[in-house]
Amino acid sequence: MKILFLGPLKKSQKKIIKFLRKSGEKVIQKSSKLNINDKYLKNSEFIISYGYQHIINNKILKKFKNNTINLHISYLPWNRGAFPNLWSFLENTPSGVTIHIMDKGIDTGPIIFQKKVFHNKEGTLSTTYKNLEKNIENLFFKNWIKIKKQKYKKIKQNLKDGTSHKKKDKKKFDYLLVNGWNTKIKNLISKN
């Protein structure tokens, strides 16, 4: 299968690309904004987004139908959008990872696989983020064949129960991040 992988080439994304290639898939990676006339789209059958910083045009999503998934490090419908790991601690919402079909909203598409993740309160935002990355990788590895063959149940998100955040929402809480991403989780919970 020809896969367009959207996202940066960080360690976690590289692991998934390597896994796909070892599974016999042809993968092209792109992190820049995608447009409807992009040459990569013409040669792709499936789109995987993970850490991609751009909104995908709805025409592209319609063209690929259920062949567009997003790997998100939150337990959707909570913490859609930016900095999901941070918000799970600031707002005491469930932490986890989710694979969902993409739609025109931000992290609002039907859930196909997800897992709650629990963290050590002695950990930091950085260590809990790495834990979420490991969990999304494993969830993807375990379910890739089902995803590829579309052998899954789609669960509509209850967006009324969930939360959503933009990058700018973090600014009013920056004062809590005394050690940046190395701030301990227990310090966030006790101060908020």
Image (cartoon, rainbow, N blue to C red):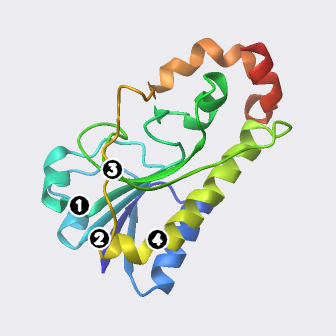
Q: Which residue is mark 1?
A: 66
Q: Amino acid at mark 2?
A: Gln
Closer to the N terminus: mark 3 or mark 2? 2
Residue under the point 69% across and 51% down? 130
Residue 135 in percent (x, y) is at 62, 58
Q: For numbered disc 3, what is the local secondary structure? A: loop
Q: Quadrant of the C terminus?
A: top right
Closer to the N terminus: mark 4 or mark 3? 4
User: In the rendering, which numbered label is found on residue 150?
Assistant: 2
Marks 4 and 3 sit apart, C-alpha to C-alpha, by 16 Å
**Against 27, is 164 above or below?**
above
120 and 70: which is toward the camera: 120
Q: Amino acid at mark 3?
A: Ile
Closer to the N terminus: mark 2 or mark 1? 1
Q: Which residue is mark 4?
A: 143
Closer to the N terminus: mark 4 or mark 2? 4
82 and 139: which is toward the camera: 139
| Residue contact at pointers 1 and 3, CB within 8 angstroms | no
Residue under the point 40% across and 78% down? 145
Q: Which residue is mark 3?
A: 155
Q: For numbered disc 4, what is the local secondary structure? A: helix
Marks 2 and 1 sit apart, C-alpha to C-alpha, by 8 Å
**Against 76, is 79 above or below?**
above
Residue 62 in percent (x, y) is at 14, 53
